[in-house]
Image (spheres, helix red, strand yellow):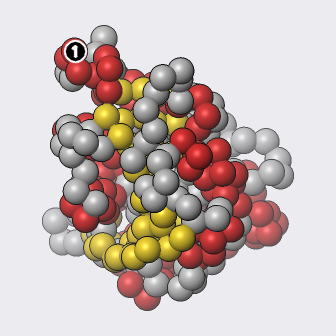
Amino acid sequence: MTPTLVRQHLSHTGATPRMDPSARARDWSEIQERMLVPLYEAVYERLEVGPGTRLLGLGCGSGLALLMAASRGAAVAGVESDCPERLTLARQRLLPETGTWGTRARVDVRLVDGSPRDAAGAGTPVYTLVTAFEPIGCLAGDSEGLGETLAAGTPLAERGAPVVLAGWGPPERCATSSVLRVATKLADPLRSTGSWRPALRDDLEEVAQRAGLRPDGSGRVACPFGYADVDSAVRGLLSTGLFDAAIRATDQVQVDKELAEALHPYQRQDGTVWMPNVFRYLIARVP
């Protein structure tokens, strides 16, 4: 799951593994995030994202999905409360003082570290589209925080606005599932708070219904994870935070070693790593 790997789902047990948060964020931005580009494109095409769109991205990460929407002419706002280092990269991409969007970006881009409610200033028009592109359905309990985020974000959208949720497809169609099981195996003492589990058919619908949203269509998109070599694959996968519990339970060296071994079946003769995956998205409507 490159762009398809989720937020940093940290276990509540033990200290956070020693790491360089800025390096992790760069690995996410430069290696992993792009893997979900087909998903972003499919959603934007289906919903005809363009100059009339006001998009609110929940869990916007380092801003690639927002950048793609802005390139279509949309006004975009992003909220990222879990990883300030990723948000820093999003600001470099999208804000005029460091980016390339010129005068329009000063009006049409808003990036927030905090609650979705902070994305609505005085006089801010309502949003016409809300996205939560961080895929759920690969860790036990990985949708728990999403309902609260949706509860804060969807009131900022107009009635009937689409809300897009994303999730992993069936494990038999996601080669990366076998690699993610390494995290569960190594984190056995902690597995109750961060263990791998296969995506279920109605995961996204259940989240939408709990948030008071009305499901209104879905789709599947092929999002292969492709890496230049095993080292890049390891760095990209680690940048998701999905292996942090395993690092706490063992150590960085062991996780790196076993992750590289799990990737071996997907390494091609030229040294590149290729893992076919399918992701699913759900379109729900604000009541």
In the rendered image, the residue lying farthest to the bottom is 172
- Which image quadrant is residue 75 in? top left
Q: SS for tag 1?
A: helix
Identified at 52% across, 36% down, the residue is: 79
The part of the image, by quadrant, that contains residue 199 is: bottom right
Q: Is residue 22 above or below residue 41?
A: above
Q: Which residue is mark 1?
A: 103
Q: Quadrant of residue 156?
A: top right
Q: Position of residue 89 (x, y in %)?
A: 40, 28
**Between 110 and 20, which is closer to the camera in this rendering?**
110
In front of the other: 4 or 25: 4
Residue depicted at 66% across the width and 51% down the height = 151
Please state the horizontal and vertical placement of residue 142, each as a whole percent of the image: 65, 63
Q: Is residue 267 above or below residue 202?
A: above
**Measuring 43% from the left and 74% from the top, which residue is drawn there?**
216
The percent position of residue 193, horizontal first and vertical second, equals 77, 63
Whether residue 38 can be seen here: no
Return the residue nearer the eye: 175 or 63. 63
Residue 110 visible in image: yes
Report the amino acid beneath label 1: Thr
